Image (spheres, rainbow, N blue to C red):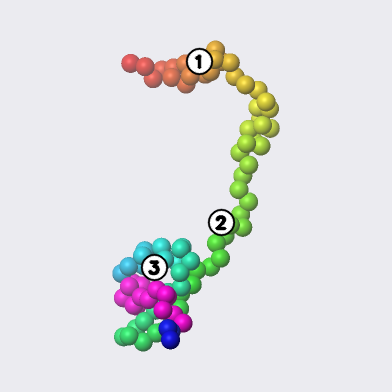
């Protein structure tokens, strides 16, 4: 019979000090990490629930529509805007 933690990542206290970036990547991937000191388990590391999933992302398309509406620029207007942006950069 397999032990319950056969797929669990393990690390040492030394890994915590010297290679935390690797452990941080594992945590970001949702792994649980068992910390061992001299071969004996001493702690478990788990990641917090991601706050990024709970944050509302801005709706840039709605913002653009609020500012510009359904306006479509003509080729002449786009050329004029590009020329204005490049003004003074030539040479």
Neighbour class for label 3 at 10 Å: few (<14), some, many (≥20)? some
Q: Residue at x 46, y 73 (%)?
A: 32
Please state which of residues 58 and 17 is positioned toward the viewer in this rendering: 58
What element does badge 2 sit on? loop
Q: Residue at x 39, y 68 (%)?
A: 23
Looking at the picture, does residue 57 appear above or below residue 51? above
**Proximity of marks 2 and 1: CB atoms separated by less than 8 Å:** no
Disc 3 and disc 1: Cα gap in Å? 51 Å
| Magenta highlight on residue 53 | no
Residue 7, quarter of picture: bottom left
Instruction: Tell whether 2 sits left or right of 55.
Output: left
Residue 68, quarter of picture: top right
What element does badge 1 sit on? helix
Q: Identify the residue position indicated by label 1 in the image.
A: 79
Q: Identify the residue position indicated by label 2 in the image.
A: 52
The circle on residue 3 is none
Q: Residue at x 43, y 86 (%)?
A: 1
Looking at the picture, does residue 55 appear above or below residue 44? above
Disc 2 and disc 1: Cα gap in Å? 39 Å
Q: Earlier in the sequence, mark 2 or mark 1?
A: 2
What element does badge 3 sit on? helix
Looking at the picture, does residue 27 appear above or below residue 90? below
* Residue 84 visible in rendering: no
Q: Earlier in the sequence, mark 3 or mark 2?
A: 3
Neighbour class for label 2 at 10 Å: few (<14), some, many (≥20)? few
Total number of numbered discs in the rendering:
3
Task: State the quadrant of the C terminus.
Answer: top left
Q: Identify the residue position indicated by label 3 in the image.
A: 23
Span colored in magenta: 4-17
Looking at the picture, does residue 43 appear above or below residue 29? below
């Amino acid at each position: 019979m397999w032990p319950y933690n056969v797929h669990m990542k393990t690390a040492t206290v030394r890994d915590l000090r010297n290679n935390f970036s690797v452990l941080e990547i594992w945590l970001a991937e949702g792994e649980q990490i068992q910390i061992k000191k001299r071969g004996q388990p001493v702690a478990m590391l788990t990641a917090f629930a991601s706050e990024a999933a709970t944050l509302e992302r801005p709706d840039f398309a709605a913002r653009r529509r609020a500012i510009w509406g359904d306006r479509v620029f003509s080729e002449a207007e786009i050329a004029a805007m590009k020329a204005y942006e490049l003004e003074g950069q030539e040479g």
